Amino acid sequence: MPKSKFRKKIEKNIAMFFDKVMGSGLAQDENTADGKRYITPGMPEKVRELASEGIVLLKNDGGLPITEGRKVSVFGRVQHDWFYVGYGSGGDVHPPYEISFFEGLKNAGISYNEKLKTVYDSWCGLEENEADHGYWGHWPYFYEEMPLTDQLVEEAKRESDVAMVIIGRAAGEDRENKLEEGSYYLTATEKDMLSRVTKAFDKTILIMDCGNVIDLSFTEDYRLSAIVYAWQLGQENANALGNVLSGKVSPSGKLSDTIARNYKDYPSADNFGGKEYNDYAEEIYVGYRHFVSLAPEKILYPFGFGLSYTTFGIKAERASDAGVKCTVTNTGNFPGKEVVQVYVEAPEGKLKKSKKVLVGYGKTKLLSPGESCEVTVSFDRENFASFDEEGVTGFKNAFVLEAGEYKVFAGTDCIRSEKIYSFEVPENTCVEQCLDISEATRRERILADLPKEIAQTGDRGIKLVDVKNGKHTMEEFIAQLSDEELCDIGRGEGAMGSALGTEGNAGAYGGITEALRGKGIPPIITADGPAGLRVRRFTTLLPCGTAIACSFNEALIEEVFELIGQEAMHFGIDVNLAPGMNIHRNPLCGRNFEYYSEDPFLSGHVAAAVVRGIQKGGAVACPKHFACNNQEFNRSHNDSRVSEQALREIYLKNFEYCVKLGNPGNIMTSYNKVNGVWSHYNYDLVTTVLRKEWGYEGNVITDWWMRKAVSPEFPGIKDNAYRIRAQVDVLMPGNMTPVNQKYKFDRDLFDSLRSEDGITRAELQRTAVNVCKFAITRM
């Protein structure tokens, strides 16, 4: 039933309010010499290449590629209203152009049934069938499908010899996907469409235009010749997809998640979506770790799976406990790329273990038929060590290799991998000793580690550039800062869309006041995000995060994000609030499209490539959300209750890889609690693990706004003071809540400094050092 004009007006007003608060809105043309929208040089070609390599071919019984002379009839209204990316801060980018689906087919040389296209265009153009994009957190999951008749399908059959059916699903921030028709499941109209088309056509190709994994058990009910999980591929979407469908590019994407036969087969199914908390009862058995260990028969498509138009032979030439060298040969008739995946199986022991764990991978160059190349995959023992929380192996709070036989597998997914080597660990061996993060000892540990105060001197005329040039020390510079300046440097400028930077930015920190700028501290401008820069300019729209990870191509990812770093510099953006890299714990998480994988090794290595690229391009990355942001529903209150083993091996491990391999300049905390403590107050996550264990020296900032709370260890410390004690340096965008349009900063931090049992000046100075060290890199 069409919406009333009154309802549309109300929703439009709500959307405008959220656009203003969340910093989105209409893009503006940038004045250029030729009057055209700015496109970063080299970006379209690289984005198209990355998008092509993220497409996953799940099935092909002769339906693909679509060779010259064949014509396709395209069914599904998404052909007209394509989902280019998800909604929210990780998707609301204003691209300089978008390639429509049929433009992509035409560019790839694929002929299509124009009569059928006209029918869909006419139906979708009616007011009652108009695609409604909703507003913040209330976006569509799908668009209503055009009902088919047998007559229309038969007419299409007379026009072409192959059918293409497109199923589209949106994903978005601040809401979950649902176990309902039109979200995780197909609608009755979509099923009817598949039924009519597959009965009429001998060849039917299914294309999934989706941000998240949805139920694919339906694919076993219809006669499908090919299944393509296209994800959402950004502005070059249809060019990339057209190249793969036509065979100009052979698909080489591999699933970054397991696709189970039924939702209830996922190990987190019974412990997802809780309002107050979620028990991570599956422990370390997330994704393929669960399925290969406990339920291989419930896998529909395994982690790492993806077909090509050609075939490959993989021969292990050399293997050890530190790596594998393979020769990969293209044994088919198409040029293509293959991904060699290496897994390790640890022996049974006292600690929980997965049957297989990914420890490395390598993607070949483009191989012509008959051509071979060598792929070397190195790995460290820490990649497959298990965390011992209690000391049952003799090593407490440590990553341990238990004694026994370790088997090394190589192959093309977590199931289709063969044992090529084994080695013995003669006795329990500590690989990494970690620090104590128990609640019982936290107060004493914090007090023992409080920094020493730098004696205040007042303004001596020392500028930050003098520290950069070696004329004065950082301590001498910090000693000048007044208490008010120390408080100000620990917050953002106030609202999203700071006047200090490009319109539509996410906020500013650093030199946010005249006093701080007078001391030479520059304002640092931030912008979302993972799918490209979300500002009020026309900027590159990238493939969604999951598609990026499915490429398994770190070198290409780094190249694309180097261009994003250059684009950020062009628009005056210092910090790109990306990558989003939380673990795909459950397929319903509304923000999975932004993130990479169920596997921490893949997620962490992809994120590190993103970070290196952005920072090589001149901007600075900010990985997020640290940590356990695996649910959007009630995300600002929800508690992720997780064992330390699962926390260390799954939900922190990806961030560890990112920090150690990428060296990001910033990290963003998450909204949720982790074991009862909000991440932005979590001393052990931010100081003990991130800074002490991993050696991180950059800034830590909050996600936008945070919750009020009192420290259980120090009742006199609350809110911003509680955050500073955890060594979370900057409150973004600058105030506690997004209620006041004035965005006046809460003065609780200043008050705490004046309190006998409050925050110390030395802790504020420590934060100032962190911010100023980073600010020097932006000068």
Image: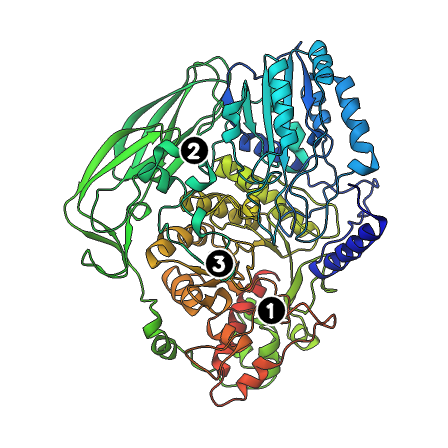
What residue sits right under mark 2 in the picture?
A: 304
For the residues labelled 1 and 2, say whether their Cβ atoms are less than 8 Å apart. Answer: no
The residue closer to the viewer here, 279 or 411, is 279
- Quadrant position of the C terminus in the picture: bottom right
- Asked if residue 148 is positioned above or below residue 686 in the image, the reply reads above
* Secondary structure type for disc 3: loop
Q: Residue at x 44, y 37 (%)?
A: 258
Amino acid identity at mark 1? Val
Inter-mark Cα distance, 1 to 3: 32 Å
Inter-mark Cα distance, 3 to 2: 25 Å
Amino acid identity at mark 2? Gly
What residue sits right under mark 3 in the picture?
A: 626
Relative side of 215 to 339, left or right: right
Q: Residue at x 78, y 36 (%)?
A: 129
* Secondary structure type for disc 2: loop
Q: In terms of image quadrants, where is residue 164? A: top right
Give the image location of residue 215, x and y in percent. Answer: 52, 35
The residue closer to the viewer here, 220 or 744, is 220
In this orientation, does residue 374 appear? yes
Relative side of 568 to 269, left or right: right
Earlier along the polypeptide chain: callout 1 or callout 2? 2
Q: Residue furthest left?
A: 426
The residue closer to the viewer here, 234 or 87, is 87
What residue sits right under mark 1 in the picture?
A: 465
